[in-house]
């Protein structure tokens, strides 16, 4: 079992089904538990029907935008940016126990070692940015 998955299981056990128990101080990879919860919720709503790699690529899209000077600098600002993640409002209302553990696994694995540092967009068809590749139901693009 990977270090990220071990940490995930420990966090889930300690906080009885949600990793949101101590949102302000605990961090993993520089992200708070609340930010991890939000990324996992967006991943579930955007890529819940995708395999683990598809979920990880959605997480990468969020993280790469945070790292890009062309997008906001926080998880909350990125997922709430107008016209971007249509699921952001629903994601904010989900509780940890409503989100499948594999979505948390996708987030934690990407905080440790991203699959792609190029993806900035994804959609059901080619949209914004330079076409990179298709995986599952999503088309991924970069700058």
Image (tube, rainbow, N blue to C red):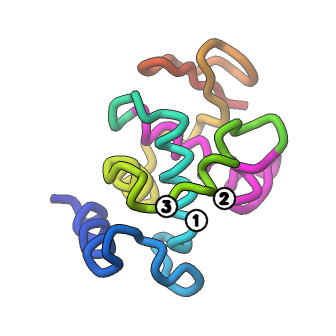
CA gap, disc 3 to disc 1? Answer: 12 Å
Query: Viewer-proximal residue, 130 or 137?
Result: 137
x then y, percent, for residue 70: 82, 46
Q: Image point 52% across, 46% down: which residue?
A: 59
Q: Is residue 113 visible?
A: no
Q: Are marks 1 and 2 in contact (CB under 8 Å)?
A: yes
In the rendered image, the quadrant that contains the N terminus is bottom left
x then y, percent, for residue 121: 66, 31
Please, what secondary structure does the residue beneath circle 1 have?
helix
Q: Are marks 2 and 3 in contact (CB under 8 Å)?
A: no
Query: Viewer-proximal residue, 106 or 132?
Result: 106
Question: Disc 1 marks which residue?
Answer: 35
Q: Is residue 56 above or below residue 28?
A: above
Q: Earlier in the sequence, mark 1 or mark 2?
A: 1
Q: Which mark is residue 75?
A: 2
Would you call the spot at circle 2 few (<14 residues within 10 Å), some (14-19), or many (20 or more)?
Answer: many
x then y, percent, for residue 117: 55, 43
Please, what secondary structure does the residue beneath circle 3 have?
loop
Q: Is residue 75 magenta?
A: yes
Question: Disc 3 marks which residue?
Answer: 95
Would you call the spot at circle 1 few (<14 residues within 10 Å), some (14-19), or many (20 or more)?
Answer: some
Q: Residue furthest bottom?
A: 25
Q: Is residue 71 visible?
A: yes
Q: Earlier in the sequence, mark 2 or mark 3?
A: 2
Would you call the spot at circle 3 few (<14 residues within 10 Å), some (14-19), or many (20 or more)?
Answer: some
Q: Is residue 51 above or below residue 4?
A: above
Please, what secondary structure does the residue beneath circle 2 have?
helix
Q: Image point 51% across, 63% down: which residue?
A: 36
Q: Residue furthest top?
A: 125
Q: Is residue 41 magenta?
A: no
| Residue stretch rendered in magenta on the structure | 54-81
């Amino acid at each position: 079992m990977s270090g990220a998955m071990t940490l995930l299981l420990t966090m889930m056990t300690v906080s009885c089904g949600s990793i949101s128990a101590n949102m302000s101080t605990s961090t993993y990879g520089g992200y708070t538990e609340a930010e991890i919860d939000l990324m996992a919720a967006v991943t579930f709503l955007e890529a819940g029907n995708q395999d683990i790699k598809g979920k990880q690529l959605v997480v990468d899209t969020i993280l790469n935008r945070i790292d890009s000077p062309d997008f906001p600098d926080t998880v909350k600002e990125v997922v709430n940016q107008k016209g971007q993640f249509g699921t952001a409002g629903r994601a904010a209302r989900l509780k940890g126990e409503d989100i499948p553990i594999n979505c948390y696994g996708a987030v934690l694995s990407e905080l440790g070692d991203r699959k792609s540092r190029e993806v900035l967009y994804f959609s059901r068809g080619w949209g914004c940015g330079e076409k990179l590749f298709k995986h599952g139901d999503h088309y991924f693009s970069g700058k």
